[in-house]
Amino acid sequence: MQPPPVIVVDRPGEEMKAGAADLDAGEESAQVSALRLFVTSGSGRAGLTLFAIMLLISLWVLVTYPLDFGSARWSSPAYWANNPRNAPPIWAATLSGQAGFPQTSIELAQPVETTTIPAGEVRRYQAPIAFNSSEAPTALILTLNGVSFTGRAPSILVSLNRPDGGQIRLTSVPVRGPRPGESPPYRRGYDVSERISLGDQTAAVDAVTRFYGERYPENETPIVSQAALPRALFGVPAADGSGRIEPLDGEYTVDVQVIVANGTDEIAPLNVTLGGTVFGIMGTDGLGRDLWQGLLYGFPVALLIATLTALLSTLIGASLGILSGFAGGLTDSVIQRASDIISNVPTLPLLIFIVSVLGRHLWLIMLVLVVFSWPGLTILVRSMVLQLREGQLVEAARAMGASRSRIMRRHVFPQVAPFIVAQMIFFAPGAILAEASLSFLGLGDPSIPTWGQMLEAGQRTGALYVGYWWWVLPPGILIVITALAFMLMALALEPIVDPRLRRPT
Amino acid sequence: MAATVRQLAFRAVSLFAVLIAVLLLLVVLLGATGFSDNLLRALVGEDVRGMRQALSQTIRDPAELERTVTARQTELESFYGLDQPWYARLPAAVGRVLLLDLGESRSLRTAAGSSDIGDIVRERLPNTVLLLTTAFLINAALGLVIGARMATRVGSPIDRVVAYFAAISFAVPAWWLGILFIILFAFQLDWLPSGGMFSAPPPQGALPRLLDQIKHAVLPVITLVTVSIGPSIYSVRTMTMTVAQEDHVTLARAKGLPESQVSRRHILRVAAPPIVTGLVLGLAGSLSGSILVETIFNWQGMGLLYFQAIGAVDEAVVVALTFIFTLLYVVLRFLLDVLYTLLDPRVRYG
C-alpha cells in the first residue's frame, strides 16, 4: 500500500478567514457552488458515473443472488462440476474466428411417455439437440437432481439418436440402492446432484465403433478413444479415408429411460449437459466456476468494503479531531498521543498478522483498516479547529452568546466539512486495495468471494501465467476501476477544498 | 538548536512507543488466542524428543529414562514460562524481541541452513533494501524532474493527463501489474526472466553475476516505479504549484530574477520539505507493498519471507517480521524528521 497523494493543507486558516466572509452572505450558496464545481469537473462526473453504475450492479446482485452465494455456491466444487475447466468466454472464440462449442444444458421436466410394465413403470424423457458446430462438445453428462424411491432402486438407460439413423446405447446404470439401516423413502441427489458421465463409457465406445463400421463401410473406421468419444458421437468418419472424425450437423436426441418399481417414485427434473469448449460471458476458472457470476458478486462486496471502512474511519477521525481541538487539555493530549502512535504503524504487515492469527473474516479486515486509518484525519481536523477557534467568526458568535455546541455545529463544522468529505473519499480506494492485497495473499474471507480471491486462485494454481487472460484481466481491471472511481471523485474535490489548486480555465 | 534536539528526542520517544505498542499487540494477540502456548510447546516437544533419542543410547532402564526426560521437560517448561499463564510471560517476550533475539524458525532456513531468524533476516534484508531503494531513487528523480516541470503547465492538456495518470497509477495494485508484466515481458516476448534473483545456475564471476541480478531486478523495479510514479509527479507538481502562488515568488519575479533562479531558490527550496516528506513516505509505504511484489517476482527478500512464513504458519517468523517491518518503518519516519529539520529552517529555528 502506498500513502495517498497528499492533499496539501499546510495553512488552512487562511482560506478559512477568506471563506468566512461569503459564508455570512449565505452558507447554502457556498455549498451549492462547491457541488456545482464538483459535478462540472470532468473527473468528478466520470467518478460519479462509475460509482452510480457500480451501485446499480450491486443492487441487482443483492436482489438476485442467494445470500449464501459464497459458501454454498462459489466455494462448492460440486455446484460447478458440469462446467468445462478453464474455458474462454463465448465471444472470444467468435472474435478470434475460431469455432467454439458453447456449454449447453437441457432440462427434462416431464416424460414424453410413460409405459406400465410388469416390473413397474418406464418413464421416457427426450432431449432434442440441434447440433450445428465444427467443434464437438467436450462432455456429455446426465444430472440427477433428486430421485426418491420406496422399493427397488430405479435404473436408467440412456441412448443417443443420431440424424443419420444411428442409435447408440450410452449407458445403463441403477440409482444407488438402499444402505443398510436406511428407511424408505430413499432420497438421492437432492443436496448434491448425482452426475452420470455419458461421454466416456467404454460400452459406448464399442457401440460407436460398431456403428461406424456398419453405417459407413466405405470410410476407414477411425480408432475411437475414450477421450474422443463425445467427438465420435456427434461426428462421422472422414470421407477422405484419413481416419479422422468430422462433425455431423443435424437433429440429435438424447433418449433417457428411467425404470421405476413404483408409480409413486419421484424424479426431479433431469439435466442433459453438453460440455462446451467456450463458456458464458466471462469463461470459467480451473474449477469450472462461472467467472461472470463471481465478477458480479465482487461489486457489492467491494463497495461495502470501500464505503463502510471510509465512513467509519471518517466518523471516528473527524469526531475525535473536533473533540481534540475543542476540548484541549488532557483529552487533547491523549487523543494526539494515540493518533501519533497509530499513524506510525505500518498497516499491511499488521493486517496480515491479525488476520492470520484471529481468522479470515471480512469484518475483521474492515475493523483493522478502520482502527489504523483514522489518525490522519484527526490530526488534520484538530489543526483546523484550533485555527478556527481563534478566528473572528467564532469570536463574534461567542460574543453574541452562542453556545459551544451551536458554534461547533453552525460555524466550525461547515467549514471543516469539505475536507472531511474529501478525506472520506480518499479512504475508499485504500480499503479496496488493502482487501484485494490481503485476498491475493490467501487471507481473504473464504465465505465471501472477492476479485482479489479470484486472482489468488489463479496464482496458486499457476493458471495466471498460461494464457488464461479471461481469468487474469477482468478481476484486476475491476479492482482498478472501482478504486479509480473514488480517486476521480477525490481529484475533483481537490480544487474545492483548496482553491489554490484550481486550474485556470 | 537545543529546542530542535529536544523536539527530535521527543519524536524518538513517541516512535519508540509505536514499537512497544505494536509488540504488545502482537504478544497479547498470540497469548490470548493460545498461539504462543502452542508455539512454545512445540519447541519443548522437539527438544524433549531429541533428548530422549540421545539418552536412549546411554540409559537402558526405561523407567529411569522416563524420569530423566520428564525432569528435563518440566525444566524446559519452566524455562519458557509454560508453567505460568501467557500474560506473566509477556514482559520477557517483549524484551526478547526488542533486543532482536528473534528465536528460531520452524520451517524456513537460510541458504547455509541456519534456522535462526536473525540469520534469515540478515540474509534477506539486503535484497529488499536493494530493490526498494533502486525503485525509490528512480521514482524520486523522475517525480522531481517531471513534477516541477508540470507545475509550470498547470491547466494544460498534458497536466490533465498527468492528473488522470496519477489517479490510475494509484488505483492499480502493484502485484496485478507485476503479473501482467511477467506475462507480457517474460512469457510472451521472452525479454526478461519471470522471477527469482539469479539464473540457474548463477553465472561465475562478480560482474556477470551482478549483470544477471540487474536483469532479474528490472521487472520488479519497473512495477514498483510504475505504481508510485503517478502520485509522486502529481504531489510534486501540486506542492510546487502551491508555493509558486505565494507572494514572495511574485516579489522575486518583480525584482527581475531569472526564472531558473526563481524556480530553484524561491519555489523548489520552499517546497522541498513537504516534497521530501511525500517521497520518503512513499518509500515507507512500498515497504509493505514489497510483501506482494516480492512474492510475485519470487524475489528473495523480506516480503517473500513474510509470505512464506504465513503459508508455513511459522508464528515465530511472522512475529519477528511484523516487528522488523515496524522497526524499519519507524526508523524511516525518524530519519524523515531529521531530514525535515535539516531542510526547513522554520523548524530548526522555530
Image (cartoon, coloured by chain):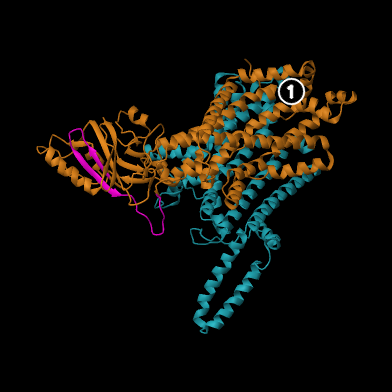
Q: Quadrant of residue A319?
A: top right
Q: Position of residue A30 (x, y in %)?
A: 73, 18
Q: Quadrant of residue A55?
A: top right
Locate the C terminus of chain A by quadrant.
Answer: top right
Q: Is residue A176 magenta?
A: yes
Q: Position of residue B237 (x, y in %)?
A: 62, 27
Disc 1 marks which amino acid? Answer: His
The color chain A is rendered in: orange
The residue segment tinted magenta is A157-186
Q: Secondary structure at mark 1?
A: helix
Q: Is residue A205 above or below residue A23?
A: below
The color chain B is rendered in: cyan
B327 horizontally vs A57: left or right: right
Circle 1 residue: B248
Give the farthest residue toward the left: A218
| Residue B221 makes an appearance in the image | no
Nearer-the-camera pick, B114 or A295: A295
Q: Is residue A217 above or below residue B264?
A: below
Locate the N terminus of chain A by quadrant.
Answer: top right
Q: Chain of mark 1?
A: B
